Amino acid sequence: MFESAELGHAVDKKIYDKEVPALRSALLDAQFDLARDGKFPVILLIGGINGAGKGPTVNVLNAWMDPRLIETNSLGAPSDEEADRPPMWRYWRALPPAGKIGIFFGSWYTEPIADRVYGRTDDSDLERSIEEIERFETMLAAEGALLLKFWFHLSKKAQKKHLKSLEADPENSWRVSESDWEQTKRYDKVVRVSELALRRTSKGHAPWHLVEGSDARYRNLTVGRTLLAALRGRLDGPAENTAASAVPPPLPSVDGRNVIGALDLSLTLSKKSYEKKLAELQGRLNGLSRHKKFQRHALVAAFEGNDAAGKGGSIRRVTGALDARFVRVIPVAAPTDEESLHPYLWRFWRQIPRRGHSVIFDRSWYGRVLVERVENLSPEDDWMRAYGEINDFEEELANYGCIVVKFWLAIDKDEQEARFKAREATGYKQFKLTDDDWRNRDKWDLYVHAVSDMVERTSTSVAPWTLVEANDKHYARIKVLETLCDRIEETF
């Protein structure tokens, strides 16, 4: 696979000096068109063999273009904060917004390859990482990102020669570390593992570009030309969704039955029983959150439900049992301008808690397959592929020790109307009621259908849905607390 990157490619200085001015001008024009267009981000991954010129090339790109519109991320070993969260958390946080270029000098490939080379993982771990990367990059492309991946290569002989020349140069000797020489001893394994990762993940929507790194002029021109061609192709060509997946639409329910309609909304709990159980369960939840085993986990709870179904009241009973220093409640509304410039899961990944902490989402990432679907705010291709992307997201959280708990609080139409009218009549509750709440009642059946599809497609063993009969608030709050306690204990 790397033969073409060991041919001794080189560019004459006269040719280089002649071509660079025009290339820089064209790159700047494309960069400004990208910023003005603002419809998609550009993500550049820079990886490869130590000593192959990755760092100098990143510096050249920043010098050739406007660095104000470039976000360069040099990601080494995870910090303590990063290590306390799923591996992809730090990469999600660093994704560039639409209209900008993000350079990853060290990317989501670095750790899986290094871990396999140094024997910290086995082949099955590497395969699992590759599958996660494939799904992640497919999602980025489907969300509109232009993804370019450059692998800088050197032959074993060229790598040793380059490191020796740097060491002999007083001005550049600092660039050579013990880890660089250590990697030369493992060169064959590095190439073997890297080839597998590159071969498996070089797709039409996220291709790898091999660059021989021995000649600086050659690699600079190669990267610059490739970036320019990709930018102009996207900016000047027709809009296309290169990673859209064909997901068959859900089958209609022939007899009209669905998981929401099957709930027994008449279930109730007396006030006396409620108060007793509330105290017991809050104490139980508090103890579980302070247990030493909880320090190896994090709690991610998502609350969805009909308008006025009691999400806020249930959340307050949960937070009332937890230490306020270690829990956050994230109210989710329509995305902000900043959030709209990123893939839709970006704003949720940013809020994932570290170990020993809890985050509660009042509304969640399921807006993509609920309100965006029903209100026609997203194309069908987008919300249909979101089911699989959400499952991948929750599985990544669970694999890292996050306890993912999801609640749908259900009430019937009559109970909702009664609660709306009660809010209208209560001064301090009127802010909870909006014109959209009344308008959404006209789409009740569409929401029931969307919720049923959501449960069918995203209730998994690692992140099952809990459907809560919420016509009686006492019953609903107790079921929520019991479920949380049971899920945490099952995890322990």
Image: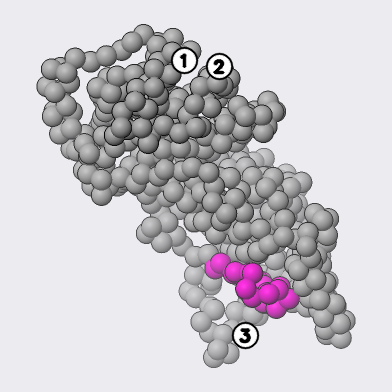
Q: Considering only vertical position in the picture, is 144 above or below 344? A: above
Secondary structure beneath disc 2? Answer: helix
**Amino acid under disc 2:** Asp
Q: Are marks 3 and 2 in contact (CB under 8 Å)?
A: no
Q: Is residue 378 magenta?
A: no
Which element is circle 1 on? helix
Q: Position of residue 332 (x, y in %)?
A: 53, 64
Q: Between disc 1 and disc 2, whose residue precedes? A: 1
Res 122 quadrant in image: top right
Task: Give amino acid for label 3.
Answer: Ala
Q: Do tag 1 and tag 2 residues touch (Cβ < 8 Å)?
A: yes
Q: Between tags 3 and 2, which lies in front?
A: 2
Q: Earlier in the sequence, mark 1 or mark 3?
A: 1
Identify the amino acid type marked 1. Lys
Residue 313 lies in the magenta-colored region: yes
Q: Which residues are magenta?
A: 304-331
Q: In this orientation, which residue lies closer to the viewer: 349 or 238?
A: 349
| Residue 55, x across and y down, in percent | 35, 34
In the rendered image, which residue does mark 1 sit on? 156
The answer to whether residue 266 is above or below residue 222 is below
User: Label 1, label 3: how many angstroms apart (C-alpha)?
Assistant: 75 Å
Residue at 38% in and 47% down: 96
Vertical arrangement, residue 218 with respect to residue 88, above or below = above
Question: Pointer 3: what residue?
Answer: 422
Residue 153 on image: x %, y %: 42, 20
Please name the residue that numbered disc 2 is placed on. 188
Q: Is residue 232 left or right of residue 441?
A: left
* Neighbour tally class for label 3: few under 14, some 14-19, many 20 plus, Cα within 10 Å: few
Tell me if I can see residue 144 in this picture: no
Q: Is residue 280 visible?
A: yes
Residue 303 falls in image quadrant: bottom right
Classify mark 1: residues with Cα within 10 Å, few (<14), some (14-19) or many (20+): some
